[in-house]
Amino acid sequence: MAHQEPANTRLWQMIIMQAKAKFATYPSPGASHWVHSEYIKHGGQFVEVSNATKQKKMAKKHFEAKKREKFEQRSEHTKSKDTDDKKDTK
């Protein structure tokens, strides 16, 4: 089963921020309708996304997070090693 997502997420987020300022309660049916119509009015389009595509996207995000975590651990290790080296030279 596929669903639709906004192709231009930056425009979508911008319009959501406008809706939060314009409507007292967001999300609400009226605000959601307004966001959708404004997005279309500003040239936004929706793309079909299948569950397989969604799973691939989540796997990629997970992989990137793990990669970032490893990099941060290496950076911390290098920093602590540098400070240890400085202590040894004094």
Image (tube, helix red, strand yellow):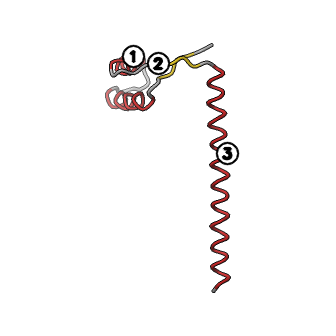
Q: Position of residue 49 (x, y in %)?
A: 57, 19
Identify which residue is drawn at 66% across, 21% down: 52
26 lies left or right of 74: left
- The residue carrying mark 2 is 46
> Element type at marker 3?
helix
- Determine which of the numbered discs, if any, sits on residue 80 in the image: none
Q: Position of residue 55 (x, y in %)?
A: 66, 27
- In the image, is residue 29 above or below residue 75? above
Residue nearest the viewer, comparing 3 with 34:
3
3D distance between C-alphas at marks 2 and 3: 30 Å
- Quadrant (top left, top right, bottom left, bottom right) of the C terminus: bottom right
Identify which residue is drawn at 65% across, 69% down: 80
Identify which residue is drawn at 67% across, 40% down: 63
> Element type at marker 1?
helix
- Mark with earlier residue (1, 3): 1
- Mark with earlier residue (2, 3): 2
Residue nearest the viewer, comparing 38 with 68:
68
